[in-house]
Image: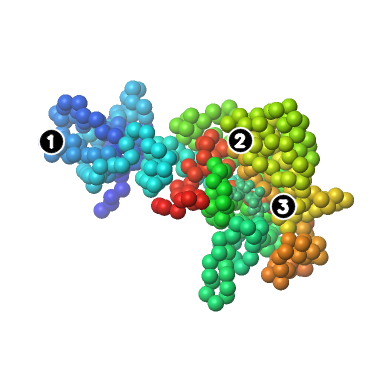
Amino acid sequence: MTLLPTTYINQIGQHVGATVTLAGWVYNKTEKGKLVFIQLRDGTGTIQCVVFRKNVSEEVFAAAKSLTQESSVRITGGVRADERAPSGYEIDVTAVEPVHVAEEYPITPKEHGTEFLMEHRHLHVRSAKQHALLRIRAEVIAAAEGFLNDNDFIRYDTPILTPVAAEGTTNLFATQYFDLGTAYLAQTGQLYVESGMMSFGKVYCFGPTFRAEQSKTRRHLTEFWMIEPEMAFADQDDNMVLQENFVSAIVQRVLARRSADLATLDRDVTALANVKPPFPRISYDEAVERINAAAATGTTVQPDDKPLPAIMWGEDFGSPHETFLAAQFDRPVFVVNYPTAVKAFYMQPVDGRPEVVHCADLLAPEGYGEIIGGSQRIHDMQLLEARIREHGLNPEHYRWYLDLRRYGTVPHSGFGMGIERCTAWIAGTHHIRDTIAFPRQLYRIYP
Ligand code: 4AD
Ligand code: MG
């Protein structure tokens, strides 16, 4: 016995003239006298199945008529090439086998509000746009891992329950860990992945990360997925070369393999075609100058055309600043050497200029903001310990991390790319919540 279909809709072109059995869900159904048209969706595509009363038994025709939106069904019929059909093929149905006739489906072709759709997210993921977005997400992940595996990076999984903070203490999710005190959900796998780097040379971790962000922006989730490569014997320049090759490979693979999904989303792909190395690099100092020069002349920023605010040297950028900077380039731009004071404790200070660090944020074009944060890490034990203290952290809690600087320390660098930010940019979708099946946000934990 098997329940599997004999083929899938994306393979249907190989079966013209043959009889196939498909299995899927009713996307839409219309009736016209002696004809029932079923739009069948099987996850790989959608195809029109035509049930003609004269060609089938009374039972089969009745079964076809009984199908409601999102009913599950197995359909058997002959494959016919048809230029008028959106998919290029149609099925002349000979048998209809309902698996479950669905109750009245809450999501209809009419417009629904965001709140309603988010409340029904478990069903919303079946709709064409969400489907395209999640496929692009899956391609981004496959491309990212594929690139790293092809370049001899070893996947090295890091823990989610951790005893201390790695990216600041203000946005930690805490939980009681038996008798051992408080555990925190990982904000990053970086500190642990550095141990793997000292073992394998080139490693990456990939998994969910958690930040109790109080922000409601279109770029923030409280749970997001991050891929974090780490390389031994590599400085920040080496790190940026890796990043521009990595991001370009991801974009070009999505363009090559997911063009139908990009078209479903009406994504203008001309901007993506430019995404090839090298990416421009500007310093934080220069970025501040550019921002202040533009702010002084009353420049406004998309999407709401608000005036670009001026900035003091030493402040971190807000999203209007990032949007303004990125808009000046036709591909992602690295902003390098941020002030030490706004960055994490582990970043390597610049020689002779300790007020800035060897780091870069990679800003995506078209207002999608920072997609990568990366840096060269401090490899000197004394300096790292001093920085831990300056951040009000207890070096005793970071004993194992300091150990990595005690036994064969090397200059090393790495970065983290947020999968949802990257997907939102490539897919050209306004809000990051649409790039993950179940977004976790300040005001949402259901479903
Ligand atoms: O710049 P971040 O905080 O860097 C780190 O966590 C480093 N430890 C990474 C490393 O060097 N291994 O975060 C990295 C990326 C950001 O550029 C962004 O893409 C994403 O993670 N990110 C978020 N995505 C969605 N929602 C949030 N709240 C995010 N915070 C960061
Ligand atoms: Mg960052």
Badge 1 or badge 3: first in the primary sequence: 1
- Residue 351 lies, in percent from the top left, at 85, 51
Identify the residue shown where x is 75% and y is 55%: 347
Badge 2 or badge 3: first in the primary sequence: 3
Question: To which residue does mark 3 refer?
Answer: 343
Q: Residues within 10 Å of mark 3 (few under 14, many from 20)?
A: some
- Residue 238 lies, in percent from the top left, at 75, 47
Residue 199 picture quarter: bottom right
Q: Which mark is residue 367?
A: 2
Q: Residue furthest bottom?
A: 179
Looking at the rendered structure, the kind of residue marked 1 is Ser
Q: Secondary structure at mark 1?
A: loop
Cα distance, mark 1 to mark 3? 71 Å
Q: Residues within 10 Å of mark 2 (few under 14, many from 20)?
A: many
Q: Residues within 10 Å of mark 1 (few under 14, many from 20)?
A: few
Q: Which mark is residue 57?
A: 1
Looking at the rendered structure, the kind of residue marked 3 is Lys
Question: Eyeballing the image, is 346 above or below 136?
Answer: below
Label pair 1/2, CB-CB below 8 angstroms: no
Badge 1 or badge 2: first in the primary sequence: 1
Label pair 1/3, CB-CB below 8 angstroms: no
Q: Is residue 39 left or right of residue 401?
A: left
Residue 225 is at least partly visible in this image? no
Q: Nearer the viewer, mark 1 or mark 2?
A: 2
